[in-house]
Amino acid sequence: MKHAGTPIGRILDGVADYTASLAAYVGIGIGYACRSDHLLLMWLLTAAAGFSNAIQSGLLDFYRNRYLDIVLGRTSILDDEQQNLREAYEGMKVRQEHALERGLIWIYLRYSAVQRGLTGKKPDQRPATNVNAAAYIRENRVRMHFWTYLGPTTQWSFLIICSFLNRLDVYLWGILVVGNIGAIILSLLQHRSDLRLHLNEAA
């Protein structure tokens, strides 16, 4: 809110979110799967749901930031930030300094590479600068609303409800099946919209 954030702060925030999610799934595995008569199946289900959760969150993060880039008429802060972080990482690596900060940057850059792979975005490809913001909003406002259902607020709320009902298996299957089906449908619709708006053209 104060525009005082830093790239490292953003990375720390993201790492904290993923650490909390990882801890939740490890807790489910230890406290729930280990009490099941089908130990291996429950651990596989837990791992698959956790991986799906990470993929869904990555897709949401990418499309939400791109939506804000276009609607607010700003340059892609993620692309610029990643380039600056790559340069900072290489500098710290050569000088063998700031091991913790260097490790966080490395994690973020690897995460960004996976994110690009999921969205089909090439490393040197930016959204076209001539995209009409009003047309983009019309195409994507409702879709962005549905993207947010794949975010942490919905997932944590669903987890809490399933925990009270003592049905964590419902949570795991919900993330694995419903969440992935939603992500696939939204990704296909997003791709069609991007083609109509020529959003996949390099700037």
Image (cartoon, grey):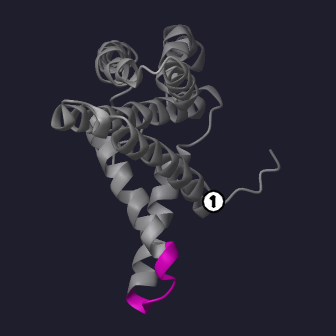
Name the residue rendered at 38%, 30% in the picture: 56
Q: Is residue 202 visible?
A: no
- What residue is shown at x 48% (from left), y 36% (from top)? 61
Residue 149 picture location, percent across and down: 51, 18
Q: Tell me if I can see residue 70 in this picture.
A: yes
Comparing 19 with 163, the one in front is 163
Label 1 crowd (10 A; few <14 / some 14-19 / many >=20): few
- Part of the protein shown in magenta: 94-101
* x, y percent for residue 38: 18, 30
Tell me where residue 54 sits by quadrant.
top left
**64 and 50: which one is in front?**
50
Is 12 included in the stretch rendered in magenta? no
Q: Quadrant of the N terminus?
A: top right
On the image, the x and y values in percent for residue 167 come to 42, 19
Confirm whether the magenta stretch covers residue 98: yes
Indicate the amino acid at tag 1. Gly
Point out residue 172 in the picture as x, y percentages from the top left corner.
Answer: 35, 25
- Asked whether, in this view, residue 76 is left or right of residue 111, the answer is right
Specify the quadrant that holds the C terminus. top left
Q: Where on the picture, by quarter, is residue 69?
A: top right
Look at the magenta stretch and give its main secondary structure.
Answer: helix
Residue furthest toward the right?
2
The residue where tag 1 is placed is 9
Does dot 1 land on a helix, a strand or a loop? helix
User: What residue is shown at x 65% (from left), y 31% (from top)?
Assistant: 72
Closer to us: 131 or 20: 20
| Count of marks, rendered view | 1
